[in-house]
Amino acid sequence: MKLYTYFRSSASYRLRIALNLKGVAYDSIPVHLLRNGGEQLQQAYRDINPAALVPSLDVDGVILTQSLAIMEYLDETHPGTPLLPSDALGRVTVRALAMLIAGDTHPLTNLRVLTYLKRELGLSEEVKLEWYRHWMREGLASVEALLAREAGNGIFCHGNAATIADCCLVPLVYNAERFEIDMGPYPSVVRIAAHCNSLPAFAAAHPSQQPDAE
């Protein structure tokens, strides 16, 4: 497998975690999101992923896109370490948490949105950062509230096994801390992320451990 990735991309980060949890070997192919105006925007990469987003996963010449969809593919093709609970209520809970992060929060704070705010709308760096922090805090508060329902039920987002929700949570916290957001209001988020980051599969996926880390 070949993973088209960028070391600080949240979506790439969450997929790296999932691949590591599954024990699936892959070759990293860095796609620099800032260099030369963004390598993801160049035709060579658009031929791989027309959406010009990372990650993309090449499985024997078939290109898979969208991190959540790929994680479910991995669960179906490598079932040994499941990333979804066995019960329907557990699965819907985990998927809801994952979508809250990857579908509701991340799209408002990703690079192409921030670039548009600054270049096209002419917002200052200060206003752009406030936009970022506002939506991150909104997302973190929602995740914290959902996790509170799981209080006492395990050491991960749901129960005692890592799921796609944990794969999404850890990059969210990484970015929040990188942009100096006060994490005090989100104790469940912090507790679960700290536990996850103590595990080899999560640690190896950290941006600082990637070959393209700067």
Image (cartoon, rainbow, N blue to C red):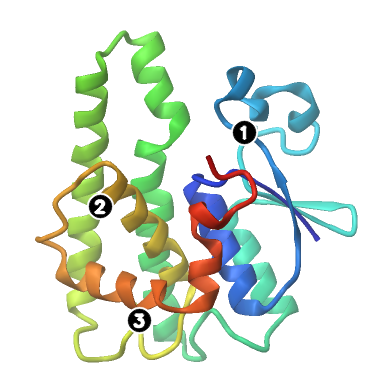
Residue 23 placed where, x, y %? 68, 78
Q: Earlier in the sequence, mark 1 or mark 3?
A: 1
Looking at the image, is mark 2 or mark 3 nearer the viewer? 3
Q: Residue furthest right?
A: 61
* Quarter of the image that includes the N terminus: bottom right
Q: Earlier in the sequence, mark 2 or mark 3?
A: 2
Please report contact status of discs 1 and 3: CB closer than 8 Å, yes or no.
no
* Secondary structure type for disc 3: loop
Q: Residue furthest left?
A: 185
Dot in front, 1 or 3: 1
The disc label shown at residue 156, or none: 3
Q: Which label sits on residue 32?
A: 1
Measure the C-alpha gap from mark 2 to mark 3. Answer: 18 Å
Residue 160 position, x and y percent, is 39, 91
What residue is pinned by disc 2?
Answer: 139
Q: Mark 3 Cα within 10 Å, few/some/many (few <14, many 20+)? A: many
Identify the residue at image location x=59%, y=77%: 21
Judge by depth and name the residue closer to the eye, 72 or 123. Answer: 123
Question: Is tag 1's residue or tag 2's residue first in the polypeptide sequence?
Answer: 1
Q: Residue 122: x percent and y percent?
A: 31, 8
